[in-house]
Image (spheres, rainbow, N blue to C red):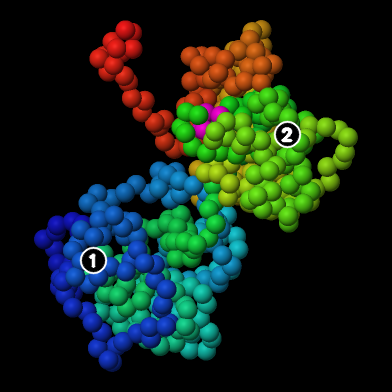
Amino acid sequence: MKPQSTAPDPFDMKFEADDDFAPTPDEGWHEAAFEGAPSALDTPPDSSLGDFDDLEIMPAMVEAPRPNPVHEIIAGAEAMLGETLVPRITIHAFLATPDVIEAAEAASKDRRMERVVTTIRPGGLPGALQAYQTQTTPSLIIVESLDSPGELLAGLDQLAEVCDPGTKVVVIGAANDIALYRELIRRGVSEYLVPPLNALQIVRSVSTLYSDPSAPFVGRQVAFCGAKGGSGSSTIAHNVAHSITERLQIGAVLVDLDLPFGTAGLDFNQDPLQGVADALSQPDRLDPVLMDRMMARCTERLSLFAAPATLDQDYEISNEAYDEVTNKIRGAAPFVILDLPHAWSAWKRKILLSSDDLVIVATPDLASLRNAKNMIDLVRRARPNDAPPRLVLNQVGLPGRPEIPVKDFGAALGITPAAVLPFDAKLFGQAANNGQMIAEIGPKSKAAEALDNLAQQIGRREPPAVQKASLISSFFKRK
């Protein structure tokens, strides 16, 4: 809602929510030039103001200003399930203010926009009008205008005359007026944004415009990586996958990508005839039927793509095969847990940077600290608009070993550990030797509690409430 003020609003054209803005013949749009606005924005002209209460495209419409730091809006900007890349389109942005130009430049470098060709130019709406007198329009035009609503509408009418069919338009304007917003949407503008803006808001707006409701389902990809060998990242990944499916009751697929030495089959007491190596050797043949045949069923909700864990062959697999197979597996379940080997490679780097969530498992020693810092710095540079990786400190409290304190370890990396697991050789050893999970061997242990908490952070939900039996039903059961 607009804050109340006694000062006159220079952008207020005295529009009312139920005003009729039907364009006259002289100012009508070329409808084909701005077709394709999302159905969620096709609000009838006589809708009440309450219909817009849930829209997030105009952050200034809320009563109190929202905080702008990137990490405070990560949860809202990312979907519950997997994120898909924006398709191969061309975007021309004609912007007027330095802050918006900076946000657009950051958005163009975002990992979700890697297939998009973006050109950013100064000049705002007048610059766009001048440019398209002599050139064709791209897939999407983003224009910023500091003009009054009347001047903005007049300028957009001129832009519509030179736009090619199929071009979408996003407008960034200074007027936070609901009636103006409705008029823009009615005239065919795909989106209207009001500063201040950040890169994620721009990325989400573009992604929403080109989302395909008929596109295949995409699960959320979570990659687990150890800061050094022996840190226990595979054990953590397997137990978190089990907790997501059993505690949160969400379907998941666990993929063991450590082909020669993977332990997922041992940890779940499974020995499938086929696994992820077969899929990687023939990625073009992998379809849902073949994928289901290759996966082992660990529980009702958890499937396993096991590694062969044999040295009888050399695994010369292309980076493209890893990319194709992991993308296909994302359609099999809401969560895909990737257990990555410690060895560094080009395909591993690509998976780390393209996953929706990244978990780095480290032990409290200097080598782990150095390696974890290198990985976190790499991810922060490549994914500036994403939340930082989650840090898990494992094997804390090993008797006789000098350790870096948990607080100092996190401070050196600029990250608060998402989970701290105590050293418990008996518990973890028994679980590994029995082919069971920590929650099955020691459900009340601190390690099991920490793993469940980590699963809730990754799954972004609380476990379903368990209905307690009434006193009366308990009495009859005892009888």
Q: CA distance from mark 2 to mark 1?
A: 59 Å
Q: Earlier in the sequence, mark 2 or mark 1?
A: 1
Side of 224 relative to 182 (left or right):
right
Q: Say what amino acid the circle numbered 2 marks.
A: Pro
Q: Is any part of residue 243 visible from this angle?
A: yes
Position of the N terminus, as image quadrant, is: bottom left
**Closer to the camera in the image, 295 or 138:** 295
- Name the residue furthest bottom: 26
The residue range painted magenta reads: 241-245
Residue position marked by numbered label 2 in the rendering: 272
How far across and down, in percent of the image, does residue 379 sit?
A: 61, 44
Task: Answer few, some or many: residues within 10 Å of disc 2's Cα (few below 14, many 20 plus, some between 14 and 19).
Answer: some
The residue tagged 1 is 178
Residue located at (84% from left, 46% from top): 316
Q: Is residue 282 left or right of residue 210?
A: right
* Residue positioned 52% across, 44% down in the render: 334
On screen, 229 above or below 284?
above
